[in-house]
Every structure is written in C-alpha cells, then in structure tokens.
Image (cartoon, grey):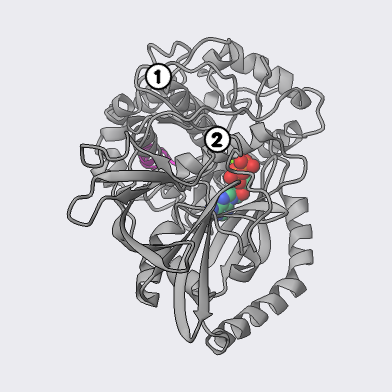
C-alpha cells in the first residue's frame, strides 16, 4: 500500500519524478562525489512492457541518472529524501522480477533489478535515506520510555533481528505543515550526523496515523534522573563535561546548533557509568552557515541562554550556556534559576544573575568554579566556544583522568536534589497559560554535511523479506506472534506506570 498523501513531501515542490540537470547532459562529473553512497545498474520499465537498463549513482539526497557506467555524467536526477520506498516482487509469464518503487506525493518511479542480491544492496542503502511505511510489520512496541511535548517514545523490538530500538512516535492528528517542517528539520539534522555520543536515527516511517523515528535504544534513562542521586564528585563532573563539550564541538564544527541542551535530552548509557551518554532530541536544532547569526527564540527555561530571551541575535554559544547550567547543577545539586512559575524562572534566566556564593561552592576548586562561571557568562562574546572550553585547565587537567571514574557510594544515597527535581516537574505543567503561547518553529534548513558512513544495515533483510515467498516468511511471523503476545499483555500496565512517572515536558517557543 502506498499512502494516499505523503505529508513529508510538499505536493507543490515537484511536478515529475525526474528533474533535468543542466540541459540534457551536463558537462562535468557529479560534484558531490564525497557524498557518493552507492552506484549500479537499474532497469526502468517502458510502456511496451520492456525495460531499459541505466546506470545510477546514489547520494544522501538524490538518485542520479547517468549517461553510462564509464561516463557518469548526470542526465537527470531525483530527490529521494522524502520519498516512500516500497520493494516489490512480480511473476509475469513464468518469469520473476524484483524491484522497488520510490513514491512522491504526486509522482513515482519503479526500478527493476536482476537479482535479489542486487535488490538487497539497493534497499539497504536506500532505506535509511527515504521513508518507510510498514511500521507495524517491522516493530513491536513494548513499553513507553519517554514523553515529549508532541511525541511518545517507546522501546520497540524489531521482529527480524530481535533487537531493541527506541521509537519516537508522533501522531499525525492536529499536526500542521509548520510542525511537519520542524520534524523534517529534526530528521534532516539527525540523518547527517554520526557521532558515538549522539543518538543514531536509523529509519523513518510514515503511516496513516503517525510518524515513527527508529533510533538507538539507550537503557540508562535521562541525566535528569541521575542528577536526583546527588552532586557529582568534581573529577567525574569534569570528565562528563569533557564528553559533552566534545559533542557540542562536533555539532558546531558541522554547522549545527542544538538549542535544547538540558538533562532530559541527555541519556546516560547505563548503570554505574556516570560519564558516558548520548545526546538526543534535535527538534529545535538548526543548521547554519558559519557566519550566520540566529534569532528564533526557543529553548527550555532554566537552561536557555539569556541572549535568546533578550531577543538578541545569537550564535552557537547558546549551547555552551546550557552546558554550563548542567555543570552548575552537577557540582552544587542546585538549579541556578528557580521560581514558582515558568515566568519567574524565565525572568531570572533572562537577567542571568547566578549565585556563585552558595556554600556548596566552598568545597569546589577554584578552577571548577571558574569553568562554570565562564560557560554561564551572560555576554556570549566572553563565553568560550566549545573548543576553547575543552582547553580550560579544569577540563584538560590531569585530575580528570588520574582519579578514575568510580562513583563514591555516598553519592547514590544522598538524593540531595530530589526537591529540586520535584519543583522542576511542577514548572513543566503544559496547561500553564504561559506555555500555551509557545509553539514549535519551522527551522530553515541550510548547509550540507555529507554522510560518510553508510554501511549495510539490518533493513536490507527486513525489506527483502517482504518480497520473499510466503513460506520464507513463516519463521518471521512466528517471531512476530511471540512479541505481539508479550506486548499486548504488558503494554497497558507499563504505559500507565510511565505516564505517572514521566513529567510532562515543556519546550518554550515564543511567538514573536
Ligand atoms: N533513543 C532513546 N532511548 C531511550 N530513551 C529515549 C530515546 N529518545 C528519547 N528518549 C526519551 O524520550 C524523551 C522524549 O524524547 P525527545 O526526543 O526529547 O522528545 P521531544 O522532542 O518531544 O522532547 C526523552 O527525554 C527521553 O527520556
Ligand atoms: Mg526532549
């Protein structure tokens, strides 16, 4: 089944499937060769039932129709990033044919291949770059593990490889085009970045009811929960911050500003590891040209940089401010901006008066205090970049590596910031009239970062399975039944528990 509407692709944007490049033939080879993902022969069906075989080059966003294998000058090209990918299998006059369809909102193209192996090769490369549809055939939702303003996140099991994934599900109901543009921006940013401390987005699905983003599953929970256990010893906080700055530096070097760095969006890997994590939630992130300033007001109260709240143009330095707030909480167990309402927090956040005279600072080294002061500096000009912050002696000094990263037992028992966490929970009530003034923005897409690593993924076998003979699929159906029984019996209870335990999340997007 192909969806009647493809909400990701703007129906106005393209008339035909193929766009001609520069005239009938271009005179130069395809420019983004570093972005080349795959190349090979595909056959296109002709109206008389025959096929014409042509050579194609796949990049992260386009399928390029080339003159020939030896001369890969581009004849025409098709954008593929928001197209639906469907493999197919036909038997005609005793002969079998394999292939796949790329379906846009008002156009489509069938491609045929010579063998299942070749089909598998193409599907494995295309599936992370396009939109898939048969979500329920591929995954079994097991339990709710998180919630955002517009989404629920589930742990899901992939039927074929039986591995767990995190699936961010966004219901389509009441979502408008500007929301879809924001979601596209989140997907586009995540598809472009590969970093061990950033959640990998594997696949995107669109069904009649919802969008699903299939990501790495991180078991350890949010940093928010970890902070409840108490203050971090200084050397562990420094090791954590070094890792966080490393990720921020990577993002900024690739022209991405996250704009929503906060403990809910940092997922700790597991159990007793306090310094390793994965950064998630690129819903507010933006791609920018190197010299460009940003002006859209967005972020989360208590973590957002003051220049954003002061309606000033701002830069990637806003992420450093948020990182500084996290470090303040880690070292003191206190939030720098508190209040009994979101307005109060935002006002203090905007004024940026941060208390460094608390007695909690007495036990912290001068270097540590100096580091947090520099990151939470209200003037972004004087705030260090991620690269500069990495060179701060508190981060680069030997004490972060020499002491080892074992967590003192007392840390687990202290629970000193529980009250703070509860207060934060209250402030995140979505029904607040203040919050209702805000909405998610449409973030413009600019810049381009080639995807370097495009190894074969599990999707290849999974998509291929759909076109295999029925008896081949029986094994899969058995696995599916096992998971379905499990998920049906546990889901309602677990999602109830998680509804009680998960505070509603707020993200603040003033309408100018
Ligand atoms: N890959 C993941 N693994 C485990 N939990 C996740 C994952 N992604 C998100 N979550 C959980 O779901 C919550 C909401 O996800 P997030 O992407 O932040 O959504 P939103 O954009 O709506 O805030 C996160 O704060 C986290 O608790
Ligand atoms: Mg979030």
Considering the numbered disc 1 on the image, is that residue within a helix, a strand or a loop? helix
Please name the predominant secondary structure of the magenta segment in the image.
helix
Whether residue 7 is visible here, answered yes or no, is yes
Q: Considering only vertical position in the picture, is 317 above or below 469?
A: above
Where does the image place residue 37, in percent across and percent down from the top left? 31, 53
In the rendered view of the protein, which quadrant contains the C terminus?
A: top right
**Camera-side residue of 261 and 215:** 215
In the rendered view of the protein, which quadrant contains the N terminus?
A: bottom right
Residue at 46% from the left image edge and 59% from the top image edge: 127
Q: Nearer the viewer, mark 1 or mark 2?
A: 2
Whether residue 282 is visible here, answered yes or no, is no
Where does the image place residue 147, in percent across and percent down from the top left? 68, 47
Question: Is residue 240 part of the magenta span, yes or no?
Answer: yes
Residue at 75% from the left image edge and 72% from the top image edge: 488
Residue at 47% from the left image edge and 20% from the top image edge: 376
Residue 13 badge: 2
Q: Residues within 10 Å of mark 1 (few under 14, many from 20)?
A: many
Q: Considering only vertical position in the picture, is 110 above or below 334?
A: below
Question: Is residue 239 part of the magenta span, yes or no?
Answer: yes
Q: Residues within 10 Å of mark 2 (few under 14, many from 20)?
A: few
CA separation, marks 1 and 2? 46 Å
Pick out the residue farthest to the front.
Answer: 48
* Mark 2 sits near ligand 1, with its Cβ under 8 Å away: no
The residue beneath circle 1 is 374
Mark 1 or mark 2, which has the lower sequence index? 2
Residue range highlighted in magenta? 233-243
């Amino acid at each position: 089944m192909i969806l009647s509407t493809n909400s990701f692709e703007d129906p106005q944007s393209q008339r035909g499937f193929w766009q001609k490049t520069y005239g009938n033939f271009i005179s130069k080879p395809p420019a983004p060769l570093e972005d080349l993902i795959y190349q090979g022969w595909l056959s296109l069906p002709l109206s008389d039932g025959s096929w014409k075989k042509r050579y194609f080059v796949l990049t992260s966003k386009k399928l390029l129709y080339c003159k020939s294998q030896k001369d890969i000058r581009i004849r025409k090209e098709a954008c593929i990033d928001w197209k639906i990918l469907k493999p197919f299998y036909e038997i005609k006059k005793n002969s079998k044919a394999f292939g796949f369809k790329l379906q846009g909102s008002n156009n489509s193209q069938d491609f045929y291949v010579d063998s299942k192996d070749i089909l598998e090769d193409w599907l494995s490369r295309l599936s992370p770059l396009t939109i898939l549809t048969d979500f329920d055939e591929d995954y079994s939702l097991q339990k709710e593990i998180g919630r955002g303003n517009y989404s629920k996140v589930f742990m899901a099991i992939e039927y074929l490889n039986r591995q767990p994934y995190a699936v961010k599900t966004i219901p389509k109901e009441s979502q408008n085009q500007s929301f879809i543009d924001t979601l596209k921006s989140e997907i586009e940013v995540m598809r472009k970045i590969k970093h061990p401390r950033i959640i990998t987005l594997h696949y995107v699905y669109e069904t009649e009811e919802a969008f699903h983003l299939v990501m790495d599953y991180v078991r350890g929970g949010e940093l928010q929960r970890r902070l409840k256990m108490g203050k971090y010893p200084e050397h562990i906080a420094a090791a954590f911050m070094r890792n966080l700055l490393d990720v921020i530096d990577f993002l900024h070097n690739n022209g991405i500003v996250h704009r929503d760095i906060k403990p809910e969006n940092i997922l700790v890997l597991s159990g007793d590891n306090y310094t390793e994590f994965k950064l998630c939630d690129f819903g507010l992130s933006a791609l920018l040209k190197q010299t460009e300033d940003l002006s859209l007001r967005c972020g989360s109260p208590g973590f957002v940089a003051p220049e954003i709240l002061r309606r000033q143009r701002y830069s990637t330095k806003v992420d450093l401010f948020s990182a500084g707030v996290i470090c303040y909480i880690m070292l003191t167990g206190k939030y720098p901006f508190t209040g009994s309402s979101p307005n109060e927090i935002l006002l203090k956040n905007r004024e940026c008066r941060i208390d460094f005279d608390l007695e909690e600072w007495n036990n912290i080294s001068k270097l540590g205090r100096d580091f947090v002061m520099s990151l939470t500096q209200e003037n972004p000009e004087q705030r260090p970049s991620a690269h500069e912050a990495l060179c701060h002696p508190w981060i680069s000094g030997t004490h972060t590596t020499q002491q080892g990263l074992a967590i003192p037992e007392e840390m687990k028992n202290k629970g000193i910031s529980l009250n703070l966490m509860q207060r934060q929970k209250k402030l995140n009530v979505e029904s607040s009239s203040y919050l209702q003034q805000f909405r998610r923005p449409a973030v413009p897409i600019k810049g381009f970062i080639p995807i370097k690593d495009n190894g074969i993924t599990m999707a290849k076998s999974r998509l291929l399975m759909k076109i295999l003979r029925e008896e081949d699929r029986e094994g899969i159906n058995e696995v599916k039944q096992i998971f379905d029984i499990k998920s049906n019996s546990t889901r309602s209870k677990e999602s109830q528990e998680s509804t009680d335990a998960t505070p509603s999340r707020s993200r603040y997007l003033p309408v100018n």
